[in-house]
Amino acid sequence: GGVYVGGDSTFTANSGTIGGDGAGNSAENGGAIYIAASGKVELKGATISYNVSNTSGGGVENYGTFEMTSGSVTNNTSGHNGGGVNNSGTLTMTGGTIANNIATADGGGVYVEDGGKFTMSGGSISDNTASTSGGGVFVNGAGTFTMSGGTISGNTANSRAAGGGGVTLNGGTFTMSG
């Protein structure tokens, strides 16, 4: 991918683009950014777009901490789960946009892995597509998704059997308030 963040490092993206139309990055996991368990990324205005992963996390593969206050994760594609973000760590979204991403399996916008935590208090997850289920967000196993603000709209899940255009739970927990 474009950036690897590990070793107790913090990467702050205030502006600029990782990827870009016709110039995206590709990797097995985390087309634009791979965040290891000890890494942290703060997205504060940058754009992550047109990246591809063969497996998961078309835009971002997160095992550490990913904080999104503004900026966008758009037009990324994964060969399996998490077209925009595949989250096994801690993902906090207070603003910004996750939109127009594609997963060939589950979680077009965000896929929350077994044990991952996703907290959303602002921003939008829109117009993402999953070939199977969870067009906007897919929560798996012991994963948790807590939403107290923001919007999830216009997402598509193409499987009639599984569905869940906005949010799909597969044993996970979804708490919505506010």
Image (cartoon, helix red, strand yellow):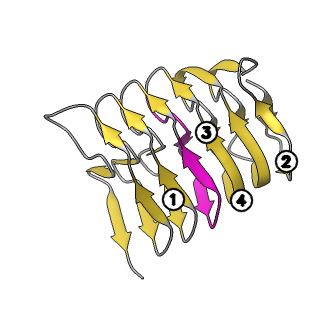
Query: With respect to residue 129, does 92 lie above or below?
Result: below
Q: Which residue is mark 3?
A: 74
**Split into 4 quadrants, where in the image is the N terminus?**
top right
Q: Amino acid at mark 4?
A: Ser
- Left or right: 159 with respect to 20? left
Q: Which residues are magenta?
A: 81-99
Which comes before the other along the chain, label 3 or label 2? 2
How far apart are labels 3 and 4 at the CA level?
A: 13 Å
Q: Does the residue at mark 3 contact the one at mark 2 (Cβ under 8 Å)?
A: no
How far apart are labels 1 and 2 at the CA level?
A: 19 Å
Q: Which residue is mark 4?
A: 70
- Left or right: 89 with respect to 144? right
Closer to viewer: mark 2 or mark 4? 4
Q: Which residue is mark 2?
A: 11
Q: What percent of the width, then of the height, locates residue 42? A: 77, 55
Q: Does the residue at mark 1 contact the one at mark 2 (Cβ under 8 Å)?
A: no
Which comes before the other along the chain, label 1 or label 3? 3
The stretch drawn in magenta includes residue 16: no
